[in-house]
Image (cartoon, grey):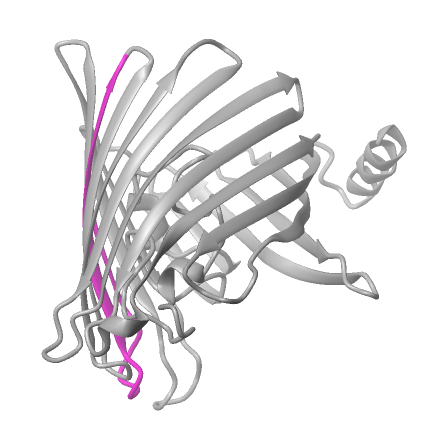
Amino acid sequence: MRKVLLATTALVAMTGAAAADVTVNGYYEFNYTATSDDRTDTYDTMGDDTEVHIGFNTTSDNGLTYGMKVEIETSATDDLTVNNDEASMYISGDFGKITLGENDGAAEDGVLWSGNTHFMGAWGSSVTKKNSSGTAMLVDDHVYYGPGGNGMKVKYNSPNVGGFTFAYSMEDKGSSSASEDTQASIVYSMDMGGVGVSVSAGMNDSGESSDTNEAAFQFIQLTSGDLTVTGGRSTHDNASDSADIDTTLLGLDYSVNDQITVSAEYLNSQNGTSGNKDELDATGFGVSYNIAPGLNFDLTHHTYEVTDATSSSTNNDGSVTRGSIKVSF
């Protein structure tokens, strides 16, 4: 690590950006997921997730701050696969921040849903979106905020004005038939009698193609001391799947101490399309334990029930338990 930093610092100095701050960090996570449900397939799996992030930032004499970041993602197969997960540059100042490249869309900035043990990004299993015959269910397993992912885009973040922040992003794929994802979000935060209050709203529209996805969401989050309560709702229209999905979730996070955080949540997702009213109900709890600096253990357990609108014989219910241990630097 020290050799990497020394070499990087020397390289930056030679290129004339001696004031640049160079950062190198990353993590490796090993996880095990055990699923028990009405399906005959086994979903007990081991997996991993690895990323290395390299970036720099500097401030010029005229007050502009600018830099870049690359996120390198690896997956362990028979041959180690290395992918460029995100790569972007940014320029910021009193006007706000402009980001160019492969990065998250603007809707991400309005998602007030955090913690290691919640639905979003916590357990990674698609089994809850399938019925007992393995057919995909037309429901969402988190508050839906857009299919844009890390595609090439232009993004703008406004400065904080009276507690308000705004973000907008756009992808242009160069074809009238391609999905050109547009996202926007707004967040307002304030303190009300010692309770932190944040509300947000966002949207995305994936363009004029036949598989257009359109979504909108709203969040409210209350924080008092060590307790955080979050509520969220989204609507999601998918033209290609004839889906009109409404999703609601509630979450609680409580910091027991500096090392342990516990959480609980409830989610309901329904497809309101005539003749295809699939539904998912799920509840869960989790604990996150910071064993030592850079060493963390997470454990989650969720139970769920999916209802197949077209065939009750393929309804499904079960549970997913996931444990992961993560080292980071």
| Rendered position, 145 above or below 254 | below
User: Is 124 situated left or right of 194 in this image?
Assistant: right
Q: Where does the magenta region start and end?
A: 201-224
| Rendered position, 150 above or below 172 | above
Q: Quadrant of the N terminus?
A: top right
Q: Quadrant of residue 211?
A: bottom left
Q: Is the magenta stretch mostly helix, strand or loop?
A: strand
Q: In which quarter of the image is the C terminus?
A: top right
Residue 301 horizontal/vertical position (percent): 44, 38
* Residue pictured at 65% horizontal, 40% vertical: 56
* Residue pictured at 76% horizontal, 57% vertical: 76
Residue 299 horizontal/vertical position (percent): 52, 32
Front-lying residue, 124 or 101: 124
Q: Quadrant of residue 184?
A: bottom left
* Residue pictured at 42% horizontal, 47% vertical: 319
| Rendered position, 260 above or below 203 | above
The extreme left residue here reads 274
Residue 272 horizontal/vertical position (percent): 12, 69
Front-lying residue, 241 or 73: 241
Residue 214 in view in this figure: yes
Residue 20 in view in this figure: no
* Residue pictured at 44% horizontal, 20% vertical: 261
Is residue 138 a member of the stretch shown in magenta?
no
Front-lying residue, 145 or 7: 145
Residue 23 horizontal/vertical position (percent): 68, 35
| Rendered position, 221 above or below 175 | above
